[in-house]
Image (spheres, rainbow, N blue to C red):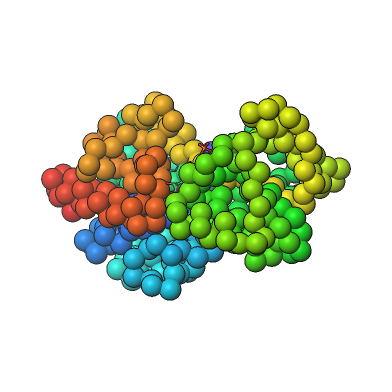
């Protein structure tokens, strides 16, 4: 292995001379489904995992709406199964992250922490990251009571009082999960109507550990060494109150991880990559799938479907190029 002057390591493999046929960025349901389809077409795709192996789905404790698992399946377990299935047919999975891409000409150039790749086709499945409240105390108390992942951090709040921010499926699903550990879970929502689906709403309303504070936003997260309280403002009356709490779990939507592709691919105002029905982006040979391109459905099953479609279309593109 040689190290070049930019600090990038070069594995000195065939890849240095010959571009890959297909590189996939992201190891969530979209990326690994794309890998499965490409591997079965004997494209030998390379998956660059990104920092979160398995994507956001892997952080979900139980996934109950992915078909084929009538009793539900653990998020990380499903990610493992996706990966094993893709690898069984010849996909390679590298734990690495892209730091730059050049889509101005083909083969496309993808720089990662470890090296540079050239690839004839690219599937972007970089997902989305949870939004921040952007309020005082949020960054300061991250890891000291502020969290975006109940599955990861819920255990630390055994017999404690926590608040959950948001009124969507994530807030309710994660809030329900937190009742396994916490003494109480107070869901703070800025309106008086939940966005979450009926099943989760019914479960949350029926759970004696869950309470709601409506029409309210958090303006500050307060504490000394760790979270001790949140300052609430009622958006209708303007009334300000402090609510004691040990933890703040924030589930207020997501932002697509598409910064790398800015000014290279067409995107909407929120940064979601624009694709057509065939998962084609504005650059031929570049496809996008999953939450990086989907502000609407954002489900494991829809992301997996988009990933499969992106790979199938990419395979056709490679066939036309004569590099299949
Ligand atoms: P979401 O549906 O966009 O909900 C975000 C929630 O946060 C909304 O209630 C919103 O309030 C609130 N919010 C947004 N910005 C806020 C701010 N600055 N301050 C306070 N509150 C704020 O996001 P999500 O719950 O993460 O769900 C995303 C997608 O994934 C959805 O399509 C959802 O169906 C799906 N999902 C599905 C499941 C499942 O099927 N089991 C589980 C998780 C997620 P408003 O309602 O007032 O806009």
| Location of residue 181 in the rendering, given as x and y in whole percent from the top left corner | 69, 65
Residue 159 appearing in the image? yes
Is 4 above or below relative to 324? above
Quarter location, residue 66: bottom left
Identify which residue, 184 or 219, lies in the foreground.
Answer: 184
In the picture as drawn, the residue positioned furthest to the right comes out as 224
Q: Left or right: 288 with respect to 197? A: left
Identify which residue, 298 or 15, lies in the foreground.
Answer: 298
Q: Left or right: 233 with respect to 228? A: left
Identify which residue, 169 or 320, lies in the foreground.
Answer: 169
Residue 50 appearing in the image? no
For the point 33% across and 52% down, the residue is 302
Quarter location, residue 91: bottom left
Q: How many marks?
A: 0
| Location of residue 303 in the rendering, given as x and y in whole percent from the top left corner | 35, 52
Identify which residue, 28 or 7, lies in the foreground.
Answer: 28
Q: Left or right: 111 with respect to 153? A: left
For the point 85% across and 46% down, the residue is 225
């Amino acid at each position: 292995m040689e190290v070049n002057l930019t600090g990038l390591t070069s594995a000195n493999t065939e890849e240095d001379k010959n571009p890959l046929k297909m590189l996939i960025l992201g190891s969530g349901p979209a990326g690994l489904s794309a890998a499965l389809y490409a591997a079965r077409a004997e494209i030998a795709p390379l998956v660059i995992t990104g920092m979160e192996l398995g994507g956001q789905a892997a952080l979900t404790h139980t996934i109950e709406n992915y078909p084929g698992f009538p009793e539900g399946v653990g998020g990380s377990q499903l990610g493992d199964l996706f990966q094993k299935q893709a690898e069984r047919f010849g996909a390679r999975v590298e734990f690495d992250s892209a730091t730059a891409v050049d889509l101005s000409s083909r083969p496309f150039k993808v720089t990662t922490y470890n090296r540079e790749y050239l690839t004839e086709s690219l599937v972007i499945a970089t997902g989305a990251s949870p939004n921040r409240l952007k309020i005082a105390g949020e960054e300061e108390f991250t890891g000291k009571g502020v969290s975006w992942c109940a599955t990861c951090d819920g255990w630390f709040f055994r017999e404690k009082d926590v608040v959950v921010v948001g009124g969507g499926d994530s807030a309710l699903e994660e809030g329900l999960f937190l009742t396994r550990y916490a003494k109480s879970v107070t869901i703070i929502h800025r309106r008086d109507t939940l966005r979450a689906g009926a099943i989760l709403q019914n479960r949350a309303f029926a759970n004696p550990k869950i309470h709601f504070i409506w029409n309210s936003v958090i303006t500050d997260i307060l504490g000394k060494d760790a979270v001790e309280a949140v300052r609430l403002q009622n958006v209708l009356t303007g009334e300000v109150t402090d609510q004691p709490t040990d933890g703040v779990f924030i589930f207020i939507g997501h932002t697509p991880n598409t910064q790398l592709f800015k000014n290279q691919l067409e995107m909407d105002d929120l940064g979601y990559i624009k694709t057509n029905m065939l998962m084609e982006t504005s650059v031929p040979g570049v496809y996008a799938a999953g939450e990086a391109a989907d502000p609407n459905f954002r489900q494991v099953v829809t992301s997996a479907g988009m990933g499969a479609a992106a790979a199938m279309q990419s395979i056709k593109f490679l066939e036309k190029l004569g590099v299949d």
